[in-house]
Image (tube, helix red, strand yellow):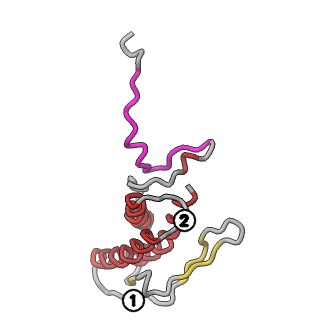
Amino acid sequence: MPAAFVLQWLLEVAAVPAAYAAVHTAHLVDPLGAGLSFALEPRQLYPVVVQLREAQVTPVLLEERLGAAHAAYLSAATELALTYRPGVHLGTHQRLEMVRDVWAMALARACGQPPPQRGSCCYLYVLPGTHECTGCPRLRRRPPAVDRHADR
């Protein structure tokens, strides 16, 4: 679970600024070309401040900005996901689905929409007292419950 969480927030560092900039401004944030850096919360070590050295001004239509931002994110995020070495097995399918999911989640938040269905799992459900998160792919795979007493 920690390996999935770390990969997810690393991908969010690239996806969130790119999605928000494309939706709310005329800027394109390319995670590889923007000089993207971040600071961690000192005790819990999650990103709290994201900084950009530069962002391109792109006076194009929203759909074109989103396409360019998504392409730039995919290039950086796919490389990161495939080269990430957490010390535990995290399959290629999980990694690539997480790349897609993090973009979709960032874009949904930027547009004020609910979380989308996911193709990757964050494994939050393995913690005591928790359950699957919103959009978890495990919820779609679960067979419907059969009520054995329905005919009585």
In this view, 39 is above or below 127: below
Q: Amino acid at mark 2?
A: Pro
Mark 1 is surrounded, within 10 Å at the Cα level, by few (under 14), some (14 to 19) or many (20 or more) other residues, namely few
The secondary structure type at the circle numbered 1 is strand
The spot of residue 10 in percent (x, y) is 51, 70
The spot of residue 148 in percent (x, y) is 41, 17
Indicate left or right for 65 with 85 as reference: left
The spot of residue 76 in percent (x, y) is 41, 77
Looking at marks 1 and 2 on the same chain, the residue that comes earlier in the sequence is marked by: 1
Residue under pointer 1: 56
Residue at the spot x=27%, y=78% of the render?
Answer: 64
Q: CA distance from mark 1 to mark 2?
A: 33 Å
Residue at the spot x=38%, y=52% of the render?
Answer: 117
Q: Is residue 119 magenta?
A: no
Of the 4 image quadrants, the one containing the N terminus is bottom right
- Nearest to the observer: residue 87 or residue 100: 87
Pair 1/2: label in front:
2
Q: Is residue 111 visible?
A: no
Residue at the spot x=55%, y=50% of the render?
Answer: 124
Residue under pointer 2: 86
Q: Is residue 55 visible?
A: yes
Secondary structure mainly formed by the magenta segment: loop
Q: Amino acid at mark 1?
A: Gln
